[in-house]
Image (tube, helix red, strand yellow):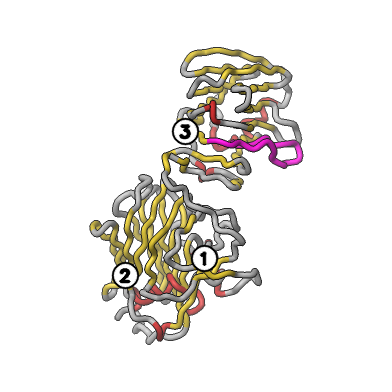
Amino acid sequence: MSWTLKGMLLTVGLSILGAEGQGNGRDKKEVSGADVFYLGQDRDDWRPLVQTAVNMSELRSIKSTFQLRTFDPEGSVFYGDTKSGADWCVLGLKDGFPLMQIHREGMLMSVTGGPKLNDGKWHTLELRNQDKFVVLIVDGTQPLIAGLQPQKEAEIFGGALRLALGGILINPGKLLVPFKPQLDGCLREGSWLNLSVPWRTEEDEMWQCLENIKPGSYFPGKGFVVFNTSVFSTQAEEEMNIEFWGDFNEMDGTICSFKNPGQEPFLSLVADKSTKEIALSFGVGKVYLKQAFRRLKLNLKSEELSVCLDGSATERLSMSSPGYSNMWTEGSLTIGGLLGEDGAVTQFLTGCLEKIEIQGKNLDMNLAVKEMSVYSYSCPA
């Protein structure tokens, strides 16, 4: 039995304990590895949602299977290691495709491919060792195979194997291919090396997975996402276009707000479900929009704001503000809340934004500099 097969699955078992083999002193509670896990739950970026460890001598299988469902193109799914993190394996998603990264005996490799998994459907994944190769099988077909043969003889394994879900136990700087860690996705029906040992979590309460999902971003009334506006613009651009799709009648709270450093927001869009209106504030100007539409577009050009509802222009506001142009290099865009002068966020949004476009492109939530309590790629269906 080669290291690749055994060590990879070992890797899957040890990483649940803590980065670089060290715990952080937090209280932990036990959960079953067969439970349903929402991997996008708020926590430190790379800290696993759950983890476990077993003695290598107890292993009777080198295969793990589980089901995964997500619309998110990027994030960490599964981690395993031996030798307290000296040899490890990480399975994640990058651009929607499975990505495996393996480190053994000083050798580091990555492989990506297979079918895209971020289509919102449940996929069955099997991870196993086969001689000198690590094999990932998706839905019974289309295997992704990684081979690794160190020059020195493989050791006889003993000690602990750590496994983790939704995070890793090594320094992220050791990854050959960097990626954003947290995945807005659900994992269920896990069978981990045919072991029945409990897994551990530091979370007081585990978030529930949505029963049925559709593409979009769901804001449950306590979450928000913040972006630096500099990632959306180039020196040649003199205007900003942002467009939202969704059932605006069902939204309540701040859809978006723009601000410059040290100033109050100069633009905000706030839905009121009780009055079926949206208040649009730009500088000192304010208008109220009726919510009987499904598409809202804002066009910011120079010191003027134009509003289009379902493709038709309806409102135009102007503002004289000496700090407006700084928005391109220093500004912040908050989706789902009102970002105040002190950096605190209030007036959270409740509802689903089915689609968000900025500068004509779908908004990539992985560009956010801060995200809290948002289902970034899925809405209840």
The amino acid type, in three-letter code, at marker 2 is Arg
Residue type beneath disc 1: Val
The image shows residue 136 at horizontal and vertical percentages of 31, 63
Magenta region, residue range: 335-351
Judge by depth and name the residue closer to the eye, 185 or 19.
Answer: 185
Q: Secondary structure at mark 2?
A: strand
User: Tag 1's secondary structure?
Assistant: strand
Image spot of residue 197 (x, y percent): 46, 76
Looking at marks 2 and 3 on the same chain, the residue that comes earlier in the sequence is marked by 2
Q: Are marks 1 and 2 in contact (CB under 8 Å)?
A: no
| Mark 1 or mark 2, earlier in chain | 1
- Left-right relation of 114 to 327: left
Residue indicated by mark 3: 355
Does the magenta portion include 112? no
Q: Which residue is drawn at the image coordinates 42% and 75% (left, top)?
A: 196
Give the labeled residue for mark 1: 50
Q: Circle 2 is placed at which residue position?
A: 128
Q: What element does badge 3 sit on? A: strand
Q: Foreground: 33 or 354? A: 33
The image quadrant that residue 161 belongs to is: bottom left
Which x, y percent locates residue 167? 51, 61
